[in-house]
Image (cartoon, rainbow, N blue to C red):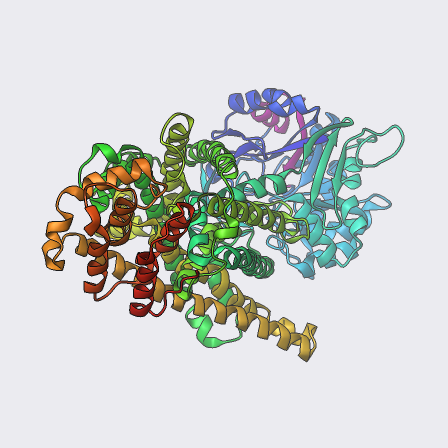
Amino acid sequence: MDLVVETHCINTYMKDNGLVTNAFNSEEFARLLLLAPYVPFRSLFIDYQGAHVEGPFISPEKKGCHPKQHIRGFGFDPVKAIEKVYGSTENIAIVTIAPELEGSDAAIKYLSEHGVLVSLGHSTAGLIAGERGVAAGARSITHLFNAMQSYHHRDPCLIGLLTSKMLGNRTMYYGIISDGIHTHDSALRLAHRTNPEGLIVITDAIAALGMGDGVHKLGDCVVNVRGLHAILEGTNTTAGSVASMPYCVRHLAKAARCPLEDALICATEKPATLLGLDRKGVISIGSDADLVLINENVDVLATYIAGKLVYANEQPTRAVLTLSKSMFNAGCFSLPYAWKLGGLWVSFCLSFVIAGFNWYGNHILVRASQHLAKKSERSALDYGHFAKKVCDYSDIRFLRNNSKAVMYVVNVTILFYQLGMCSVAILFISDNMVNLLGDYIGGDQHAKTVIMATIALIFIMGTNMFTEMRVVSAFALVSSVFFIIGATVIMQFTIRQPNQWRSLPASTNFTGTIMMIGMSMYSFEGQTMILPVENKLETPEAFLAPNGVLPTTMIICTCFMTALGFYGYTGFGDKIAPTITTNVPKEGLYSTINVFLMLQSMLGHSIAMYVVFDMFFNGFRRKFTARFPNCPKFFVDKGFRFFWVMVTYLMAVLIPKLEIMIPLVGVTSGTLCALVYPPIFEMITFWTDWKGLLTYRERMCKIALNCFVICVGFFAIGAGLYANGLAIYQSFSRHKGRRRSCSETGTASLVSDNLLHTKSYCQVNHPFERIPDDDLETQDVVTRPLMAFWKGTKQFGNNAFDWMISTIELKQEISFQKFVYVDQIRSWCVQEQLKNGKLIFLELLIFKKFQSLMFTK
């Protein structure tokens, strides 16, 4: 493979290889040219042909992004001027010169005699000056139409060289930037039809290629990249583009309406012919085995240099790993508890249904995004800007006028989603810390959770102060390792538990099922990462292919999450905790694994918050510094980060229960991003196209399907908000009830201080040790005295059962969830072969008092 490196008079750089010089004088330039053959790509067996030098012998009026102070003429001695600027011409392959400059004919002749290809460009020359340059030895034109005089019917300028009579039988080669930005499609067709033999595809791609939209450096210049277009900051001057060679070849074939094979020849055989490289640019016996493997869309699949594989497109594999990592987080470990809320077989079926809905929403989201990216000539669109583009290109005036408002709504949804994920991470850490260290701290469950969350906040605040992406990437790598280790150990421990699937309920009630749906929606927490991952692919079509990134990721995640939910619930049954990590033993390897997973969540918090910082910080800083210009940037940056981290901490403290926070986030923001926004945006994006491409029946089917998905999404949101609101109310009611004196129920003399002893006795001697410590009412009303009575403990004596009955009768409001352990107690009694009529009396009493509670004999 040959490489001709382009250099500019100040922005001298090796494209895609990072060799940059930010000054221009003879000594530095000569040193750069001497270093060029020894840059790192020599280790890849690349045959270096030399540099393409643009400047400094160009027209100041057509300088482009070249700094004007470095542009010069040839003076009285062109040869001396060339030697002063370039030094030796040994490592120069092409030089661009403006032929109207005084002394250019002698310079062109000198360079041509020394084996340097002279190209005409960055020029105000007319046709006569151009023909004089060709007569002196120039053989090509630099980026036709750009940085030169426009075509005029009296003087076609350099463009007229394509059909000049003085060429005779010679071919006038010309580079043309077919990126859709530098050259209009009509101009591409005109050039191709006028002189197809001389057309050479070039890219003009700058170093920002592949780095996404934003502000980037090009030597000393600052360029602003939007889509494929790069302009000098503060001007309207084009500074290049970020279109790749495969994109330019594709675009030429489409714009010039020529066969793809012809477009490929313009990027391979013709450049080699111009440079006199007989063994390059063709596939034949005796030619160099420099090959690029592409598909029908000109996506690069592999590259061979000198017969050796030096590049293979493994991006789809990396994309699967990245997207899977975004879905595998702390929320996964609450899936067994979600199955308990929904019932075994209902949860099993709903897991696949929820996965299917998520796949459909993500699929149509990416398809619409790819369509709009091509339409708007943007290389990448995040969720918010995608929503804006949907409205900008809509036929509905209201949407076009309010596109920014729609973008803000989507961004706020993503903001709440990311903040919810971070608060879940804090709760996950605090719950596991309570599980490991809670016995050493006094107070109830809520107080312990707040204390542990505060301790975790100190470390989380530290990890969120890092601003560099490479540090965040390192966090992501370490977090992935911790998660894989923790998930593997917990899964094997879960699978080894006695399976209880025969004794578990197939379904529960409406509230529990809705909570299960919310927690499952949260577990697919990669909705906001779908578009960023797709944007990074060199072959976007691989994302939606039948065996592509999205289907593969969804299958992997669905299988893992279903297995974790099934084995976790059937392994621990009703004892399953809101996070399965607290069901594993507290000693040895398992305590270490818990620490690993807490560190994983801590690092995951900073990764999720990076999305928030990236989305909102630049706008905040611009407005804040405009109002407070004297405030140090350090305090602005750290203060912004401190504020949002504190928001996630307060969310965790105000709703300190994983089993409530996870479904609350999943059923609101998660459902909006996965089930509501995508079908709405797809219908707006393709509405006009569907009218022309689909039959009436096909169009109605698509619309009906999308409307159905939207209705399911809104129903899930409404039901989820109701269920979560009820759960939050009950949680606060229970917390308030624990603080009431036992004398209010008339049972103080029976409970007294013996409850603590009974609790310890039950945890040591009975199979009910997994009953949550914070569910004191269930323990007080049913579990503790019943177990104490049946085990013959002397703490309550024979009055224990009567005490329990009287306590239940005095209760005015007891929800179904407070008796989730009664069936467990009954099963245990059967195992103990207890034949006591009072048990049946207890069941009948509860059934009479609470009609929704059903028991089986």
Q: Residue at x 65, y 48 (%)?
A: 548
Residue positioned most to the right: 285
Residue placed most toward the observer, 13 or 453: 453
Residue positioned most to the bottom: 696
Residue placed most toward the observer, 333 or 586: 586
Q: Residue at x 26, y 44 (%)?
A: 788
- Tell me the quadrant of the picture where the N terminus can be found: top right
Q: Is residue 89 magenta?
A: yes
Q: Which residues are magenta?
A: 77-98
Residue placed most toward the observer, 472 or 604: 604
- Tell me the quadrant of the picture where the C terminus can be found: bottom left
Q: How many numbered discs sit on the rendered protein? A: 0
Q: Is residue 667 magenta?
A: no
The percent position of residue 134, horizontal first and vertical second, equals: 74, 41
The percent position of residue 299, horizontal first and vertical second, equals: 69, 45
Can residue 630 be seen? no
Residue placed most toward the observer, 723 or 279: 723
Can residue 500 be seen? yes
Classify 598 as above or below 36: below
Q: Is residue 261 left or right of residue 596?
A: right
Q: Is residue 754 left or right of residue 264?
A: left
The percent position of residue 239, horizontal first and vertical second, equals: 52, 46
The percent position of residue 41, horizontal first and vertical second, equals: 64, 25
Q: Residue at x 32, y 47 (%)?
A: 423
